[in-house]
Amino acid sequence: MRVLVLGGTAFVGRAIVDAMLASGLSPTLFNRGTSALFPEVPRLVGDRSTGDYSALSSDSWDAVVDVSGYVPRHVGQAMAALDGRVGRYLFISSHVVYAPCGPGADEDTPRREPVRDTEVLTNETYGPCKVACEDDVLARFGDRATIVRPSKVAGPFDPQEGFTHWLRLAAAGGRVEVPGDPAQPVQLIDSRDLAQLVVRLLVDDRPGAYNAVGPITTLADLITTCASAAGTSVEIARVPPAPAPLIRADWTTQQRSSARARAAGMPVTPLAATATDVLAWDRA
């Protein structure tokens, strides 16, 4: 199975390509060519920010995985460049496409209104821009469209502050200050579980939308699990509210249903295993 991967390979894309290679799929990378990762994998050089898709003009693939489509222009230009030469279009979206909803929300939960008049991504525009991208993929590919909506992703090679922030504090031991409620729900997805879901959906040729979300825990349990992985002891102290990774005012966004993704074959890596692996990578 030949699969075109649109986007970088720093974190989520890296896990997806690793999973493809382990499963016997044949990926081709399309990006700016600035990474030396996966030298054995065919690479096509282009730039989505400038609309340079000329390298895609002379080949075809069974499927495409769009890891780096954030605004409708990116997705529309990619689909136009691949017109008639790709089977399934799997778009990596986000769980923030949903409108406010209660715990246990599934993929049929109403989404936010799409936004097409900006490419400036903020907390307010990121989700609506992803909604617009989803709509465009579905309009063009129909039953050959697959949408994956991850929650916050954790795992080795994560370049963002998030899970790693709390892991480092827990690994240091002692007092860990939480500028919010330590009982707040938290819902992460291990990057490798997300990657396995993507591969499974491609191999099984599954259409539809899937919440790539892991089990629900609390911020306090996350911190103590990280401390256990590091062999330290922590004292969790609630302090006045302040911006911090994973702190959310809307807790319902951290309590989504993963039933459809699990039924499609998404595995669940225990949080302790994710913490152990991320800690080893971070220390290295």
Image (cartoon, grey):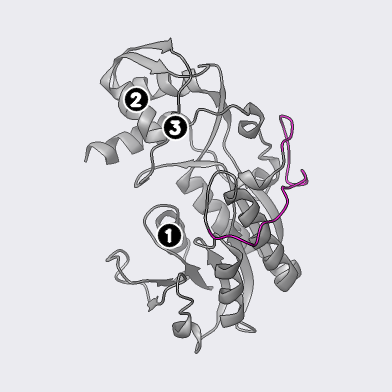
Which dot marks residue 176? none
Residue 98, horizontal then vertical, whole percent: 69, 44
Which residue occupies the foreground of this view, 69 or 60? Answer: 69
Q: Nearer the viewer, mark 1 or mark 3?
A: 3
Reading the image, the residue beneath label 2 is 229
Residue 250, horizontal then vertical, whole percent: 63, 29
Reading the image, the residue beneath label 1 is 22
Q: Nearer the viewer, mark 3 or mark 2?
A: 3
**Picture layout, residue 143 above or below residue 231:** below
Reading the image, the residue beneath label 3 is 245
Q: Residues within 10 Å of mark 1 (few under 14, many from 20)?
A: few
Residue 62 seen in this snapshot? no
User: Which residue is pictured at 31% across the width and 28% down the height?
Assistant: 168
Residue 247, horizontal then vertical, whole percent: 50, 27
Which residue occupies the foreground of this view, 272 or 83? Answer: 83
- What's the magenta region? 100-119
Q: Earlier in the sequence, mark 1 or mark 3?
A: 1
Q: Amino acid at mark 3?
A: Pro
